[in-house]
Image: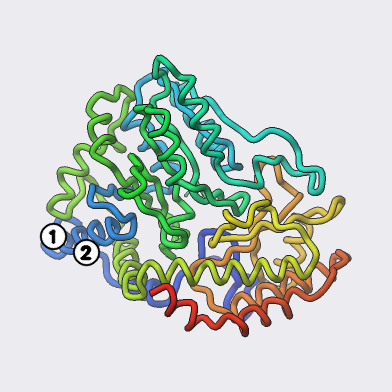
Amino acid sequence: MIALDNHPSGRHFLQIPGPSPVPDRILRAMSLPTIDHRGPEFGALGLKVLAGMRQVFQTQHPVVIYPASGTGAWEAALANTMSPGDALLMFETGHFATLWQKMALRLGLQPEFLSVPGIDAATGLPNGWRRGVQAELIEQRLRADKDRRLKAVCVVHNETSTGATSDIAAVRRAIDAAGHPALLMVDTISGLACADYRHDEWGVDVAISGSQKGLMLPPGISFNALSPKALAAAKASRLPKSFWAWDEIVEINQSGYWPYTPNTNLLYGLSEALDMLLEQGLPAVFARHQRWGDGVRAAVRAWGLPIQCAEAAVYSPVLTGVVTPAGVDADALRQLIHRRFDLSLGTGLGKVKGRMFRIGHLGDCNDLTLVATVAGVEMGLKLHGVPLAGSGVQALMDYFAGHPQEAVLKAAA
Ligand code: PLP
């Protein structure tokens, strides 16, 4: 075992927006003995997780499961549908949208990167890193693309670096209003199983997700959900692919097997995670995360600190970005909190590095986990000398007391 000197007793508080804390039920499921991935029992496991993932993506069409992190499934989405030099329309919502755009460049594609211009005067943060996709800008650009050069529109459903979601149904409407044939690709790596995601209803062609966020598993598996149009595009696509190629995987998956060795024990975990999510029901799962997010944001407001996401309508149910006052290094604050309270918070990424930290409210959480998390942050802010308007802990306790989980879940069911 590696030494975890920093965790002398009790559970570490892993309050980053993924990997999320893994429930004991899932950890136990993953500890079962590894079985033969070509043996008789495995096919049943494979069929179960593939069917369960179709329910979670809310699709009737194939879902592909890769033994890879989310970045692999990003590459798979592009490699299976695009040809060298193809133009794409991507939208700068934050760090992960930027990484996907860089990947497209490395793959020899020509991504156009739409952004909301300017810097927000109050926080000093880029405006585009405080909100979701602006569907009207996408519609405008697609209408101007008279010779239909753009082959896909790529957006991030839940931008993990900012805590802003995007309205995917509005992006679909924008593409349809422009009468444009581009594929719609959606990164829901951190959105899936926390925020509502409707693959078929929203007309998404390729969705990308990962195991380590709303699915509550360790990192290591990722997903593409497909549409018939995406499968047709794959037949014409000329980017090289072998490991990522959908055709062979989708074919062999029909019997519950893979063309190569899948990660058996993570699939045990996925099977358990699907049981947990589907037993509770997706609407209740989404309501649970939304309530946690609302509570944490009540705490941030009580501290008098800006919430990174500028639009309440697109607040993330997965995480909350907290902007630190000018001159307060958010990473030094995070390090202090980690050292003193064994609590991990998400770092600021890319253009917002050092200016904010992220509180994850997903995975194996409950009200008291979040009260303790907010207490750790509040103690850290005080120790770091950050002036606070009031107590976030008190605001969160009041919020939870006034919004019982039972009532919220019942209303969602
Ligand atoms: N996209 C989003 C929205 C993410 O949050 C992440 C990881 O946090 C990724 C892509 C990259 O996924 P991975 O780190 O699993 O490769």
Quarter in which the C terminus is drawn:
bottom left
Residue 1 visible:
no
Quadrant hosting residue 391: bottom right
Tell me the kind of residue under disc 2: Ile
Q: Where is residue 326 in the image (x, y as percent from the top left)?
A: 85, 51
CA–CA distance in space, label 2 to label 1 = 8 Å
Q: Residue at x 58, y 55 (%)?
A: 313
Asked if the residue under mark 1 is in contact with the one under mark 2, i.e. CB atoms within 8 Å, the reply is: yes
Give amino acid for label 1. Answer: Gly
Is 389 above or below relative to 59?
A: below
- Give the number of callouts: 2
- Which residue position is annotated with label 1? 39
Residue, x 23% and y 52% (percent of image)? 60
| Residue to which mark 2 is pinned | 35
Location of residue 108 in the rendering, given as x and y in whole percent from the top left corner: 45, 21
Q: What element carries label 2?
A: loop
Residue 132, percent from left and from top: 57, 45
Nearest the eye: 177 or 280: 177
Residue farthest to the top?
Answer: 147
Question: Which residue is nearer to you in this view: 407 or 394?
Answer: 407
Q: Position of residue 187 (x, y in %)?
A: 45, 45
